[in-house]
Image (tube, rainbow, N blue to C red):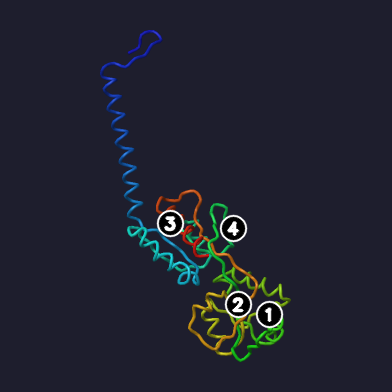
Amino acid sequence: DRSGRKTSLTEAGSYLLVEAERLLEGVESACRNAKAIAEKSRALDIGCVNFFFNTGLMPFLEELRRAKPELRMELRVMSTEAQERSLMSGAIDIGFVRSWIHEDALAFEPVAEEALVLIFPESMRHEGASPEEYFAALADRPFIGMGRTSATGLVDAIAAACTKLGFTPIPAYECLDAYSIIGLVASGLGWSIVPRIELSDSDISGIGSLQLPDRIVIGICYRKADLSDDARNFVNLAKAYFSRVK
């Protein structure tokens, strides 16, 4: 109702305003409830590098199940590189990865460290020998490397460790996983460098080993922008757990 410069609602307009506000509030409430139901029913997709799955993630999941029995999860063993791509695409929500993450949209928070270990046939063990002495003794024997397509960052980390000791390995064999490498070394076909947990988690005998000074950082990784409530709770519980067990 317009009178001069003044504008006011008629009785019908006042009624329509109240009903419109009520309807809009109902729509917003329905959307919030639907989103909450969807997030509650959807499982969290969790990625993890191979070695850390059994030794680091499994004990945490046991504790998490006691604290959050309603939380549903789908677990995938994946390389760091595959997890980085999957986190960016939304295929997984959270990853346990090694530190070579490059995307600015992803957060990386350290939770653990792993050492690199020089491994060789048991027959070549020399008590008290230094890494440099072992490298000199092994230089003429075949090096068994990790395939670059399966773990580019790990290959680079191993190459950097060798460079520090004045050696540039040229693989005579390449494998897609550390367990295959360990098996080949145990059979006497050559020597290699692998993450320590990969070695301790295997049941293969006939291996000599020497821990190197190099460390690789393991961290929890997630998208910065769109972390759900369940994912945020998971991250916070994981950080609290791993800070206790370090």
Measured in 3D between alpha carbons, the distance from the residue under mark 1 to the one under mark 3, in whole angstroms, is 40 Å
Amino acid residing under circle 3:
Phe
Figure quadrant of the N terminus: top left
The numbered disc on residue 117 is 2
Q: Is residue 118 left or right of residue 233?
A: right
| Comes first in the chain, label 4 or label 1 | 4
Q: Disc 2 vs disc 4: which is toward the camera?
A: 2
Observer-nearest residue: 81 or 47? 47
Q: Where is residue 186 in the image (x, y as percent from the top left)?
A: 55, 87
Q: Where is residue 245 in the image (x, y as percent from the top left)?
A: 50, 65
Judging by the rendered image, the residue that carries numbered circle 1 is: 131
Amino acid residing under circle 4:
His
Amino acid residing under circle 1:
Pro
Q: In the image, is residue 114 above or below residue 85?
A: below
Q: Residue at x 29, y 20 (%)?
A: 14
- Which element carries disc 4, helix, strand or loop? loop
The numbered disc on residue 234 is 3
Measured in 3D between alpha carbons, the distance from the residue under mark 2 to the one under mark 3, in whole angstroms, is 31 Å
Q: Residues within 10 Å of mark 4 (few under 14, many from 20)?
A: few
Q: Disc 4 vs disc 1: which is toward the camera?
A: 1
**Which residue in the rendered view is the most extreme toward the bottom?**
123
- Which element carries disc 3, helix, strand or loop? helix
Judging by the rendered image, the residue that carries numbered circle 4 is: 102
| Comes first in the chain, label 1 or label 3 | 1
**Mark 3 in CB contact with mark 4 (< 8 angstroms):** no
Q: Residue at x 58, y 76 (%)?
A: 194
Amino acid residing under circle 2:
Val
Observer-nearest residue: 96 or 189? 96
Q: In the image, is residue 1 above or below residue 235?
A: above
Q: Residues within 10 Å of mark 2 (few under 14, many from 20)?
A: many
Measured in 3D between alpha carbons, the distance from the residue under mark 3 to the one under mark 4, in whole angstroms, is 23 Å
